[in-house]
Amino acid sequence: MRRIRGEPVEVWLRHGRPARFVWRGRLYVVLFVLDRHGGNPGPTDSGSDQPLSPEYWLVEATAQRAITAAHFELCHDFETGHWTLSRS
């Protein structure tokens, strides 16, 4: 499979975590959150106008009616509010 980088996705959260997303017109359900890193949505200690870093979620998800789950990295850009998907 070829590497996929930064494709736009629509993500729905539940309790602050990705629960579902639509990628290439197909709905995926998140089965497990495997890792989360980055992101600093709150104010910084220094009070500077430092840009907010993106938040990355490594998830295991499956498309509806699919048998096999796959790993995806979802990236939330706090500055724009957009989500992107990467997969290797």
Image (spheres, rainbow, N blue to C red):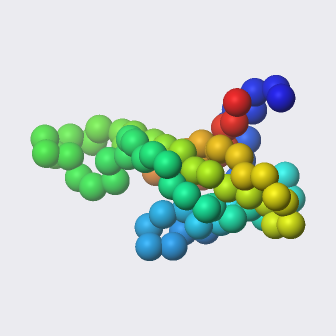
Q: Which residue does the image show at 20% across and 46% down from the upper left?
A: 44
Question: Residue 79 location in percent, x, y?
Answer: 47, 48
Residue extending farthest top: 2
Task: Let me know if residue 77 appears in the view.
Answer: no
Which of the 4 image quadrants contains residue 71?
top right
Quadrant of the rendering where the C terminus is positioned:
top right
Pick the front one: 46 or 30: 30
Residue farthest toward the left in the current orientation of the protein: 46
The image quadrant that residue 23 belongs to is bottom right
Residue 45 in the image: state x and y as whole percent: 13, 45
* Residue at x 32% of width, y 47% of height: 40
Above or below for 83 versus 4: below
Q: Residue at x 60, y 42 (%)?
A: 73
Q: Is residue 9 left or right of residue 82?
A: right
Left or right of 16? Residue 81 is: right
Give the x, y percent position of residue 2: 82, 26
Q: Residue furthest bottom?
A: 15
Q: Is residue 36 visible?
A: yes
In the visual, does 30 lie left or right of 43? right
Quarter of the picture containing the N terminus is top right
Q: Is residue 73 left or right of residue 9?
A: left
Q: Nearer the viewer, residue 21 or 7?
A: 21
